[in-house]
Image: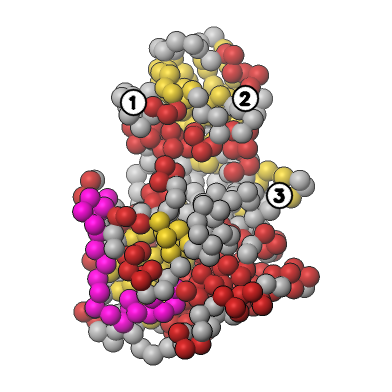
């Protein structure tokens, strides 16, 4: 109860900042926002780990809310949940790294940040982190990234190496990089896949601890061998998407998709005695936005366009829920006029103007500027070097031509992928005002004949 009262404290400020009653037909109540967060980010759900029973409980909650608002089941679906079987290897935690005559051990000498679930072998090349986007790296190489002092310099380099086909990525630990293990809950991110997909070609990513970094070769050409071992799984795993549908009056007008992901990291490495990664901001906040937009739109007059409200599972282990949705959409993808994804809207980003959400890929289409013209508190993403546009569930649909963007708050807040990403660290007033600002612009989009378009050079599907 004390937490609830603290979250409701900014109500006076919030009321003053909201549009006047004449400008809005629906008011989002902070207590509704808080109530969703109170349940979704509670310790009872144990962090909503991807493809776990806790994720299924979260999806069931979202589905029940959709039904209570009066949403219908999506075309071709018998209920509000879409499930998918996944293949998820589980490693035994005893990987080894062979470098010439030296053998390094997982835990003692290095942290295995990510693995495809299989062993790997490759020849070593050295590349400076800043040069990775332009470096010509032979596919299948083992790359030692130099000059990466913190996650903000390492992760874009890793993304570039992934695109180049590197088999192994090694990074020497620094004080700032020592925080990487907690960002994934202290456990290796093992490449998982949908059961009907072939294995993914993803790199093994290793953080070499400081004491072992002296064993790394100074020259190119050494053979690097990573050995991992998986353990038998007790039963197959499933992930769950919660889907609600608001039918439009004109079947030919297309469908608007509003989405977020409802899973998080589950239980992981303890930080200050807490091992539950609650994910209040990431992404219970986005899920709350989808819920409250569904609440508002379903309570109003019928709209010309249909609206799909989708909260995906298994985003944190490879965006599997959104990938499955893209392969099994309840409406044809060419009927989707736009997708607006919500990710981590629980805090104000210090680089953004007060009260404004960032929209990734702002310059790629006319969606963001048009929604802003109609009152949405949206603005350009101030972190283009972080490639946030390509790092959320919107991207899978964007690659198929759908105008799809993500609206977010603080890109990487201090609580990112930590156990203290909890209700106490959310700005409920900021969240509520941001959601409120989107209701009328989204209602307008769903009622109009305006169809968002990619700007020249902005469509990622044209570059596949």
Depth order, front residue of 248/97: 248
**In this picture, which residue range is highlighted in magenta?**
438-461
- Where residue 419 appears, as percent x and y from the top left, is 67, 51
Q: Is residue 248 magenta?
A: no
How packed is label 3: few (under 14 Cα within 10 Å), some, or many (20 or more)? many
Which SS class for mark 2? loop
Which of these two is toward me, 13 or 70? 13
Q: Nearer the viewer, mark 2 or mark 3?
A: 2
Residue 59, relative to residue 179: is it above or below? below
Q: Give left or right: position of 423 versus 408.
A: right
Q: Which residue is found at the position 69% from the left and 70% from the top? A: 7
Q: What is the CA distance from the residue labelled 2 to the residue labelled 1?
A: 25 Å
C-alpha distance separating marks 1 and 3: 39 Å
Spot occupied by residue 201 in the image (x, y as percentages of width and height): 37, 37
Classify residue 335 by image quadrant.
bottom left
Whether label 1 touches label 3, CB < 8 Å: no
Instruction: Judge from the rendering whether residue 328 lies leftward or rightward of residue 454; answer left or right.
Output: right
458 is within the stretch colored magenta: yes
Indicate the quadrant containing the N terminus: top left, top right, bottom left or bottom right: bottom right
Dot 1: few (<14), some (14–19), or many (≥20) neighbours within 10 Å?
some
71 relative position to 6: left or right: left
Other-residue count near label 2 (Cα within 10 Å), few / some / many at <14 / 14–19 / ≥20: many
Q: Which residue is mark 3?
A: 275
The residue beneath circle 2 is 209
Q: Which mark is residue 135?
A: 1
Mark with earlier residue (2, 3): 2
Horizontally, residue 190 falls left or right of residue 463, namely: right
Q: Earlier in the sequence, mark 2 or mark 1?
A: 1
Front residue of 233 and 127 = 127
Q: Residue at x 51, y 69 (%)?
A: 434
């Amino acid at each position: 109860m004390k937490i609830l009262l603290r979250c409701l404290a900014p109500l006076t400020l919030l009321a003053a900042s909201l549009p006047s009653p004449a400008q809005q037909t629906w008011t989002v109540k902070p207590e509704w926002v808080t109530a969703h967060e109170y349940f979704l980010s509670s310790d009872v759900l144990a962090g909503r780990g991807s493809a776990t029973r806790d994720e299924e409980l979260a999806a069931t909650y979202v589905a029940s809310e959709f039904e209570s608002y009066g949403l219908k089941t999506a075309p071709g679906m018998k209920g509000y949940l879409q499930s998918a079987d996944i293949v998820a290897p589980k490693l035994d935690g005893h990987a080894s790294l062979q470098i010439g005559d030296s053998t390094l051990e997982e835990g003692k000498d290095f942290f295995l940040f990510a693995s495809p679930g299989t062993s790997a072998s490759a020849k070593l090349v050295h590349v400076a982190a800043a040069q990775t986007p332009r470096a010509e790296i032979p596919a299948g190489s083992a790359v030692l990234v130099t000059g990466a002092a913190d996650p903000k310099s390492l992760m874009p380099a890793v993304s570039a190496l992934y695109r180049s086909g590197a088999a192994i990525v090694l990074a020497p630990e620094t004080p700032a990089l020592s925080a990487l293990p907690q960002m994934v809950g202290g456990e290796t991110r093992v490449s998982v896949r949908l059961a009907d997909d072939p294995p993914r070609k993803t790199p093994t990513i290793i953080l070499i601890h400081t004491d072992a970094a002296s064993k790394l070769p100074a020259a190119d050409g050494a053979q690097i061998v990573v050995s991992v071992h998986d353990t038998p799984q007790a039963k197959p795993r499933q992930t769950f998407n919660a889907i609600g549908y608001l039918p439009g009056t004109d079947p030919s007008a297309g469908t608007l998709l509003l989405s977020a992901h409802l899973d998080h990291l589950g239980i992981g490495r303890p930080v200050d005695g807490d091992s539950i990664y609650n994910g209040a901001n990431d992404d219970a906040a986005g899920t709350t936005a989808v819920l409250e937009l569904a609440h508002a739109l379903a309570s109003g007059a019928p709209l010309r366009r249909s609206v799909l409200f989708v909260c995906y599972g298994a985003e944190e282990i490879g965006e599997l829920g959104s990938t499955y949705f893209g392969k099994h959409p309840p409406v044809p993808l060419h009927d989707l006029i736009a997708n607006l994804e919500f990710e981590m809207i629980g805090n104000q980003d210090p680089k953004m103007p007060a009260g404004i959400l960032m929209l990734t890929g702002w310059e790629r289409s006319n969606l963001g500027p048009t929604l802003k013209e109609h009152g949405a508190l949206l603005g350009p993403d101030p972190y283009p070097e972080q490639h946030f546009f390509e790092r959320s569930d919107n991207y899978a649909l964007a690659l198929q031509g759908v105008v799809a963007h993500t609206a977010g708050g603080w890109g990487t807040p201090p609580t990112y992928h930590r156990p203290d990403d909890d209700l106490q660290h959310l700005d409920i007033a900021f969240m509520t005002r941001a959601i409120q600002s989107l209701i009328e612009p989204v209602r307008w989009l769903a009622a109009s004949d305006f169809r968002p378009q990619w700007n020249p050079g902005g469509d990622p599907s044209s570059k596949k």
